Image: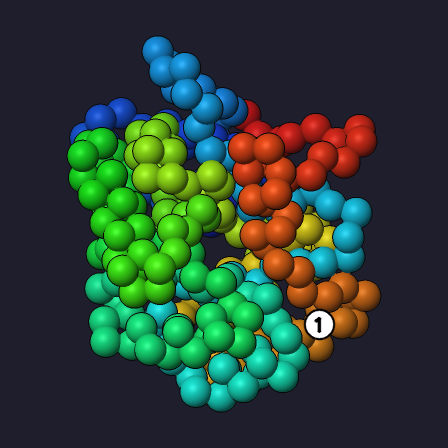
């Protein structure tokens, strides 16, 4: 996902609003977001921000960013393993490669929103943020006839304005990640136990240089998932079927964050 090297995203199951003053220089999200179900003076419900889905199912969720890396073998892997992966696409990165993602959709992948041009959104005015999110909604609707309900902000940075704009563009959940797959196939974690656990959202950035292809990195990740007694789940099923896009609640669990 073209994140800054120092970016670390900590978000609880339901976060919102990494606050930043208007005009503030965007910075990597640190996950210490506040819990703003509603923006000040705004009665609308804002979409939840998730990096982990509380669930009783032994599943993790694989999400792929940007669309720069178009490994043709990856389509075959998704088809053969029936992987319900989520592709968060940026129009300026995908360029003429939308046909590749049409093939991925045909074998079970979903396509979601990652802005038109991949800017760091935090601190930008509402009009600019809305143009980036709604603009990509229009692109994906014209390409695939779909209106994505999930959105990933570039670099994992966002503010309340992002959530307002996302809601106005038809987004029901803003998706971050607890684990990220590196170019060498290694996993790093933004918070909590450094091991995969049920409900984790895993980010697989594209375009990073390394000895392993996207297919090889994914195959290595799938082995680790299986060793943990987990399988790949469809993120949309665990978010979009809940009221207002909220993840399933586990009794006794409280959303963390501040």
Q: Nearer the viewer, residue 165 or 214?
A: 165
What is the x, y in percent for residue 132? Answer: 24, 47
Q: Is residue 115 visible?
A: no
Q: Is residue 227 left or right of residue 180?
A: right
Q: Residue visible at 30% across and 65% down?
A: 143
Q: Is residue 97 above or below residue 120?
A: below
Asked whether the viewer can see residue 215, the reply is yes
User: In this figure, which residue is indicated by the disc labeled 1?
Assistant: 224
In x, y percent, where is residue 156?
41, 47
Q: Nearer the viewer, residue 232 or 185?
A: 232
Mark 1 residue element: helix
Is 220 above or below relative to 33? Answer: below
- Give the image's coloring scheme: rainbow
Quadrant of the image for the C terminus? top right
Which residue extends farthest top? Answer: 41
Q: Quadrant of the N terminus?
A: bottom left
Q: Farthest residue in the front direction?
A: 145
Q: Residues within 10 Å of mark 1 (few under 14, many from 20)?
A: some
Q: Is residue 154 left or right of residue 214?
A: left
- Where is residue 225? Give x, y as percent: 71, 68
Q: How many marks?
A: 1
- Whether 73 is drawn above or below 141: the answer is below
Residue at 37% over, 79% down = 100
* Residue in the picture at 47% in, 71% down: 105
Near-viewer residue (253 or 9): 253
Q: Residue 78 in the image: state x and y as whole percent.
A: 57, 78
Q: Residue at x 38, y 39 (%)?
A: 170
């Amino acid at each position: 996902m073209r994140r800054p090297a120092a970016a670390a995203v900590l978000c609880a199951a339901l976060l919102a609003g990494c606050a930043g003053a208007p005009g503030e220089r965007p910075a990597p999200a640190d996950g210490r977001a506040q819990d703003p179900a509603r923006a000040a003076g705004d009665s609308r419900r804002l979409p939840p921000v998730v990096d982990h889905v509380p669930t009783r199912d032994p599943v993790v969720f694989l999400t792929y960013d940007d669309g720069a890396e178009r490994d043709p073998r990856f389509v075959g892997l998704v088809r053969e393993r029936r992987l319900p992966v989520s592709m968060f696409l940026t129009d300026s990165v995908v360029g003429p490669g939308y046909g590749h993602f049409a093939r991925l959709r045909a074998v079970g992948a979903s396509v979601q929103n990652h802005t038109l041009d991949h800017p760091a959104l935090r601190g930008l005015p509402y009009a600019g943020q809305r143009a980036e999110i709604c603009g990509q909604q229009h692109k994906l609707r014209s390409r695939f006839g779909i209106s994505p309900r999930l959105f990933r902000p570039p670099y994992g940075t966002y503010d309340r304005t992002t959530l307002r704009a996302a809601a106005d563009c038809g987004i029901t959940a803003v998706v971050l990640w607890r684990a990220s797959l590196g170019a060498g196939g290694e996993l790093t974690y933004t918070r909590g136990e450094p091991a995969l656990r049920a409900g984790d959202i895993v980010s697989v950035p594209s375009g990073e240089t390394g000895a392993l292809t996207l297919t090889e990195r994914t195959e290595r990740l799938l082995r680790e998932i299986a060793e943990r007694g987990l399988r790949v789940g469809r993120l949309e099923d665990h978010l979009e079927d809940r009221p207002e896009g909220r993840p399933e609640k586990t009794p006794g669990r409280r959303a963390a964050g501040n």
